[in-house]
Image (cartoon, rainbow, N blue to C red):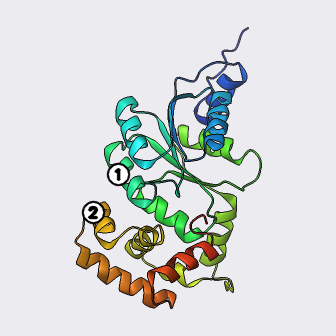
Amino acid sequence: MTVARRPASGAAALRAAADRGQATGKHAVVADDHALVRRGLVLVLEGLGVTTDMSVDSGDAVLVAAALHNPDMVIVDMSMPGGGLALIERLHREHPAASILVYSTFAEKDVALACFIAGASGYVWKAGPEGELETAIERLLSGRRYMSLAVSEQLADRLSGSPDASAAPHESLSKRELQVFEYLARGLSLAEAAASLGVSPNTVSTYRARVLRKLGVARDAELVRYAVRHGLIEA
């Protein structure tokens, strides 16, 4: 008697198809401002049977690529030109069915949580353990979520009430304050930050004042130094 095998589903189906060298029918768009990282991401996706429709180097370009190809997944870098929370929010709003995976140099729990609130489905630290990126991609393409181990451990400590001696001032910023901090640290003017956020320059100025006060700094140049020192932007 022959017993029919139950079809694999979710991540198992993706892995099985990849092991057989078959395409999964899944498509992705990749965005990072480092060519070597983009090539690596494309190779990882290819190994999982996922087709990369476009590989781009900025937030503006990934918006165009996503509109052209309507991918199942978009992998984005936080610190590339035009990247950040506003980009994640727009991608999620315009492509709600696509899984957004943030591939970031930041292992800060508050940055990761802000990305999830903005609409990301996954967050992977670039310096994470081998195989974590593949696990995250499989998880997202099977309709689940993924948070990098380094970040989830920090979050678990916070939720358990464990004291966090390493807590930094920026961890007290609200989502909007974190967005304004991000834009100003990258050198955007109040008007440019306001245009990106869809608010008035006066509103951004108010948030800027709150950020300066919470971080204990007086000028935008000090914001930049703070961001670099805490690994929130690349020097």
**Looking at the figure, which quarter contains the N terminus?**
top right
**Looking at the figure, which quarter contains the C terminus?**
bottom right
* Quarter occupied by residue 179: bottom left
**Which of these two is toward me, 221 or 143?**
221
The x, y position of residue 145, in whole percent, is 55, 50
The residue positioned 45% from the left and 86% from the top of the image is 219
Q: Residue furthest right?
A: 130
Going by the image, does 11 lie left or right of 121? right
Count of numbered badges drawn on the protein = 2
**Which of these two is toward me, 153 or 169?**
169
The x, y position of residue 138, in whole percent, is 61, 39
Query: Could you say which disc has been placed on residue 227 in the image?
Result: none
Q: Which element carries disc 2, helix, strand or loop?
A: helix
Q: Residue furthest top?
A: 1
The x, y position of residue 106, in whole percent, is 61, 63
Q: Amino acid at mark 2?
A: Ala
Q: Which residue is mark 2?
A: 195
* Circle 2 or circle 1, nearest the eye: 2
* Quarter occupied by residue 118: bottom left
Query: Could you say which disc has been placed on residue 90 in the image?
Result: 1
Going by the image, does 201 lie left or right of 146? left
Query: Which mark is first along the chain, 1 or 2?
Result: 1
The residue positioned 52% from the left and 57% from the top of the image is 78
The residue positioned 53% from the left and 67% from the top of the image is 111
Placement of 175 over or under 166, stated as above or below: above
- The CA span between labels 2 and 1 is 14 Å
Q: Amino acid at mark 1?
A: Arg
Whether residues under marks 2 and 1 lie with C-beta atoms below 8 angstroms apart, the answer is: no
* Crowd rating for badge 2 (residues with CA inside 10 Å; few <14, some 14–19, many 20+): few
Q: Which element carries disc 1, helix, strand or loop?
A: helix
